Image (spheres, rainbow, N blue to C red):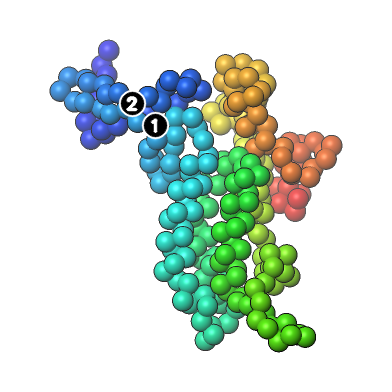
Amino acid sequence: MGLEVNVNKTKYMIMSRDQNTGHSHSMKIDNSTFERVEDLKYLGATLTYKNSIQEEIKSRLKSENAGYNSVQNLLSSSLLRKNLKIKIYRTIILPFLYGCETWSLTLREERRLRLFENRVLRRIFGPKRGEVTGVWMKLHNEEFRDLYCSPSIVQVIKSRRMRWAGHVARMGEGRGCTGFWWENPREGDHWGDPGTNGRIILRWIFRKWDVGSIDWIELAQDWDKWREL
């Protein structure tokens, strides 16, 4: 068949909703053995045989916790201004969101991301002193909204996701990404039943975008209007 095997690759994975698919076993071709795995790293992203974003977010947060720990002394330093600390956060820590345009977040993942960001912001802004008691107290999560004027980490993800969706909506016909996009999430072999992949796609497209009854696909053709939204 003219099949060429890259012997530099030592692992392979099959993505499927079948519960038995992830079970590990090896495959041998000629003199090369390939280990079957349930998850692997590809282009810096963690892929699982169930196509689960939870493991990817866990992996990203784990690496960013290490980045946060390396700069937390700077974030709590009284010698640096708050706006400089925020720049450190946005340029050193936030880049772990690369590729978040494809993330389909549940409330659990959103909460996990907010907890991480609140931890960083608490280090940046420090405690506050009570006007009456004079006692130093931790800031409540709601107070960060007034102090941190930039979009929250969840808002950044949703904004990037909408930007990517608009980009796909403006693509011409014949592009692979466009063909995949226009399939019906509730029908066909590409998506499966609404309880699995179909539900994930619908959540990625529509959840909390607040576009109401607007024909967002038509609106996305106007880049300036879509960017404003």
- Residue 65 drawn at (x, y percent): 46, 60
Which is more N-terminal, label 2 or label 1?
Answer: 2
Q: Nearer the viewer, residue 4 or 20?
A: 20
Residue, x 49% and y 29% (percent of image)?
50
**Kind of residue indicated by mark 1:** Glu
Snapshot quadrant of residue 162? top right
Residue 71, given in percent of the width and then of the height, sits at 45, 71
Which numbered dot is residue 38? Answer: 1
Quadrant of res 115: bottom right
Q: Is residue 14 visible?
A: no
Decide: marks 1, 2 in contact (CB < 8 A)?
A: yes
Q: Position of residue 206 (x, y in %)?
A: 72, 37
Determine which residue is flagged by label 2.
24
Give the alpha-carbon distance from disc 1 to disc 2, as whole Å.
Answer: 7 Å
Nearest to the observer: residue 81 or residue 135: 135
- Residue 99 vs residue 169, the one in the foreground: 99
Q: Residue at x 45, y 26 (%)?
A: 15
Tell me the element at label 2: loop
Dot 2, crowdedness within 10 Å: few (<14), some or many (≥20)? Answer: few
